[in-house]
Amino acid sequence: MTNQPIGVIDSGVGGLTVASELMRQLPKERLIYVGDTLRCPYGPRPKEEVIAYTWELVHFLLKRNIKMLVVACNTATAFTLEDLKSKLDIPVVGVIQPGARSAIKVTKNNKIGVIGTEGTIHSRAYPDALHHINSTIEVYDLACPDFVPMVESGVLSGSHAMQVVEGSLKPLKNHFEIDTLILGCTHYPLLRDAIQTVMGEHVTIISSGEETAREVSTILGYQKKLFQGNRKPRHEFYTTGKIEVFQNIARDWLQTDMNQVRRVELEEVVNYL
Amino acid sequence: MTNQPIGVIDSGVGGLTVASELMRQLPKERLIYVGDTLRCPYGPRPKEEVIAYTWELVHFLLKRNIKMLVVACNTATAFTLEDLKSKLDIPVVGVIQPGARSAIKVTKNNKIGVIGTEGTIHSRAYPDALHHINSTIEVYDLACPDFVPMVESGVLSGSHAMQVVEGSLKPLKNHFEIDTLILGCTHYPLLRDAIQTVMGEHVTIISSGEETAREVSTILGYQKKLFQGNRKPRHEFYTTGKIEVFQNIARDWLQTDMNQVRRVELEEVVNYL
């Protein structure tokens, strides 16, 4: 039914940038978010492990009667999206295809940059998604392994952040004439200002979170599953890790008070049957 | 199957701005376009007539085995979208909801302007689509009846165009602090530069065509109906009116040679059974 919640899964706190955009663009929709902070990050883990962990989060939310699933983690999207789509009877949206489609919409010279974690870049998920739609797109991708640790330590601006961003993006900035850059990691929107400054105003920055929320809206609208009427929804946030860490990051990043964060024991997530 | 064409219907030539974006954003997809130039414009016609004409165009394309229907006309979308969606077993995308969703994504102050023909503005379709998703959006809409005749007469820039655009947009520009403006008519993207100049750089202009193509991509991707593999598709364009007029406008507007335009007798469209 239309008043069921939208489920959001993430390896930790990065997906909060996606959740925040869902709340902004779909203010009547109710979210249930589960972040697997205790086992974060998923990026360096073997594919089979990421698939197993992701399914555990999915089952945790399926028991809570979600009408749609959002995979708010690039690594989990790269490894599990097709499997989830084929096995679940609710719509499933990942964070990769929305960013790819938006980049195709805005690029004028068909030269698109992608930055992400090493896992996401090595998976080739973005070039595959872009070329699936348009084989002539030139894709320049680059892993930026220093960004996530910096963001998680709370450094989002200032001279140190600028130095790290500038150093990391140098190969992309100097050698290719991209006009569009996809932030292929849910942490990166927190560094958006620094990235925009380094790349220059002529490069359009695409944030997965914004574009994913837009596509969630498109598909719920298409399926006539948008909430009807008016309400101020009560969201639920679960973390397998420490509540305080999750709350602090949510407050710092999203300027929202996260009183509704609850801890869920990893055992409950793992033993979902 | 994925190699079936996408069907595009329009009251005339305006929908070519949508077709052109579909070709750009989905270069592997094949289009069949029918423009009812002989009975254009639909805007001033009674609702029942618009519904009847639209269904005729739809049946003309259904016989050609389309995998998706794009209603590339704001008036036809306002009057027929829900009916078409409930009765057809292929996905149907109109031009109103994509523009609305994109505006919700980009606005920062939740003040959105909409310009369109008198028919579209009076239908309240844009405010309804926006408020369906977010009831707190402030919508300022304005009919610009002088734009379509000017565009169809080939005046897209220069001092006369600027005067007309400036005069028409005055109420919107002077009285409201909108940060986003939806071009709620498929002809208006041809006046985009003039509209941007008049409204100022701080207003983001949303073009239905770009956003509709993006949502066609989203829904085809979601339904696994995107064309697999590589091809340079051969599109088909049909007009119930004069081929030369259609070709000239297509050439002027889209800088594409439209050798593939064919005339279809209105009788064939009307007597589709």
Image (tube, coloured by chain):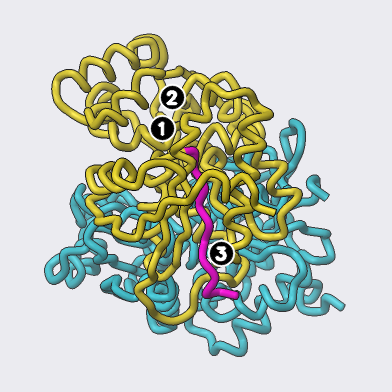
Chain colours: A yellow, B cyan
| Residue A27 locus on image (x, y percent) | 37, 66
Query: Residue B256's image quarter?
Result: top right
Whether residue A117 is visible to the viewer of this picture, yes or no, is: yes
Position of residue A42 relative to residue B65, above or below, is: above
Per the image, the residue denoted by label 1 is A183
- Identity of the amino acid at label 2? Ile
Dot 1 or dot 3, earlier in sequence: 1
Q: Amino acid at mark 1?
A: Leu
Q: Which residue is mark 3?
A: A220
Q: Is residue B163 left or right of residue A188?
A: left
**Is A41 one of the magenta-colored residues?**
no
Considering depth in this image, is A210 or B205 the residue closer to the camera?
A: A210
Do the residues indicated by labels 1 and 3 lie within the same chain of the protein? yes
- Describe the element under mark 2 as helix, strand or loop: strand
What amino acid is labelled 3 in the image?
A: Leu
- In the rendered view, does A72 fall on the left or right side of B229? left
Q: Which residues are magenta?
A: A1-11
- Residue picked out by circle 2: A115
For the point 61% across and 78% down, the residue is: B82
